[in-house]
Amino acid sequence: MMTNERKYPIGVQTFSEIIKGDYVYVDKTDLAWKMTKVSKYVFLSRPRRFGKSLLSSTLHSFFAGRKELFEGLKVIQLEQEWTEYPVLHFDMSTAKGQESPNALQNKILLQLKKYAGLYGKDDDELTPGGMLEGLIKRAYAKTHRQVAVIIDEYDAPLLEVLHMDEVLPEYRRVMQEFYQPLKACDPYIKFCFMTGITRLSQMNIFSALNNLKNISLLPQFSALCGITEEELSTTLLPDIEMMAEERGCTVEEMKEKLKAHYDGYHFSEISPDIYNPFSLLSALSDRKIGNYWFETGTPTFLIQMMRKFNYNITLMDEVESTEYAINRPTEAMTTMVPLLYQSGYLTIKDYENESSIYTLTIPNREVRVGYTDGLLPSYAGLQGEDVQIGFALKFWRALKKNDLEQALQEMKTFLAAIPYVEGFKKKLEEAATAEGFYEYTLWLIFNMLNVYARTQVKCAGGRTDMVVWMPDAIYVLELKVNGTAKEALNQINTKGYAIPYATDGRRVVKAGIRFNIDSRTIDEWIIE
């Protein structure tokens, strides 16, 4: 039997610690090196927990000339000089959650002060930008070498106030003043690298820094953060073998399970499949498939922005977008699509060359189930644990047996017995239409069960309220509040809602369902 002697860098984001500690490491140093040759100023957007901080730390060690850390890695064959440059490295995630712009400014100054011991500080440097400019120039004067500036999670201080139009400009001005010297200090800078989740406008946040190269959608850097299928089958193969042995399945079966749960990200139109690195390594370490990306819950800022834009969450499986739209600056958004893509809740599924249109979708099972749990209270007044405990298992088993009658009976009982009645009722009252409210409530519940469902599906005869895909059956559902189940079923038949699935090979089941707005549950259905 294999023994697990491998160390996994869960929560370890310092490159030197990973190398010295002999942790499992997926070598990205060749891509990091190539990135430094693309432009002097580089920006990379990736979702949270995707390895941005480790990449920043790797660049720190590289520009600090620490060749000994890179022995045996790909970059050794590429880099010849290994010059030691002064490095100014800032992690802006430590400055998030500040109660005022002044508190934010003081938090940034605290980060800058750690370099004052090395390069000094002038008395007139009272702001973050003034102090940064002074540090860059003094570091250059002291070492006679240009400076590498690395700013990780540059947007972290702004994310929590992104939906607050009244205070966002003040917080943004603090960040703008901090970043402003980077352009003026160009002669003293060797390389400048910035990471973040969102892309904020260069004009508003970076001011004159108009030469920042955004590599976030470039195919050659798609795999810079995250783990590819090839890396899974080579570097991480021993870990999969150990997990498969412990779980009593084959290596190929374990690969399929990991793929369904953590794969599916694409960061360009020709990107390889990318796995979420934090979740994948956590699963290999624990020998357990879980929803690690959501251990801290769905970010509050995301839910707030979805509410602000009144975003229809049921449309997330087939979103069409242009490159400009998904790469659009956050403060210029007119829909939630850029933020959902940049934060990892949507990813590129397909790309049409002729029209230059991207199709976006939810990446994998972990994202589908996890973010649904976060959205249920906000959109339906339900709690995720109430959906999962008891109801989910019964409903899933009924569908697996092709018993829609029993599944709907379980749903009726569940909705009628919800303990959070007032929350459910309040969300119903807030909804534009009762049918619309029940559509996204059912959609959320199906997603919580990891059942693929879509609402308002177009066909020749109109739009089907909901279509649900199971391995051996397709369910075509029409929902009515002011009507009967018979009228709903007649609408399916007369408008041909089920016709597009006739040649699919799976059983096609049609159901007209009526919701009772007083009891807030389904009270009548007809299945055909």
Image: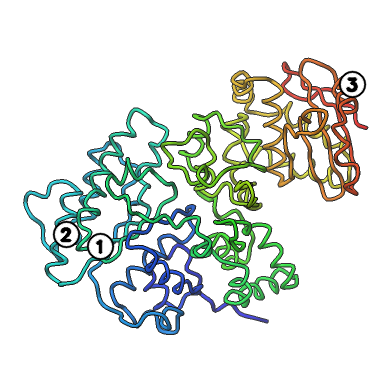
At numbered mark 3, what does the secondary structure look like: helix, strand or loop? helix
Find the residue positioned furthest to the front. 354
How far, Cα to Cα, is label 2 from label 3?
75 Å
Residue type at mark 2 is: Leu
Which image quadrant is residue 157 in?
Answer: top left
At numbered mark 2, what does the secondary structure look like: helix, strand or loop? helix
Image point 30% across, 39% down: which residue?
Answer: 172
Q: Which residue is labeled 1 in the image?
A: 88
Q: Tell whether label 2 touches label 1 (CB within 8 Å).
A: yes
> Is residue 355 rendered to the left or right of residue 517?
left
Which image quadrant is residue 162 in?
Answer: top left
Q: Earlier in the sequence, mark 1 or mark 2?
A: 1
Q: Which residue is labeled 2 in the image?
A: 135
- Vertical arrangement, residue 406 with respect to residue 248, above or below: above
Q: Nearer the viewer, residue 360 or 135?
A: 360
Residue 359: percent from the left, percent from the top? 63, 47
Q: Which residue is labeled 3 in the image?
A: 486
Q: Earlier in the sequence, mark 3 or mark 1?
A: 1
Q: Which circle marks residue 363 in the picture?
A: none
**Mark 3 surroundings within 10 Å by alpha-carbon count, few (fewer than 14), some (14 through 19), many (20 or more):** some
Residue type at mark 3 is: Lys
Q: Nearer the viewer, residue 144 or 421?
A: 144
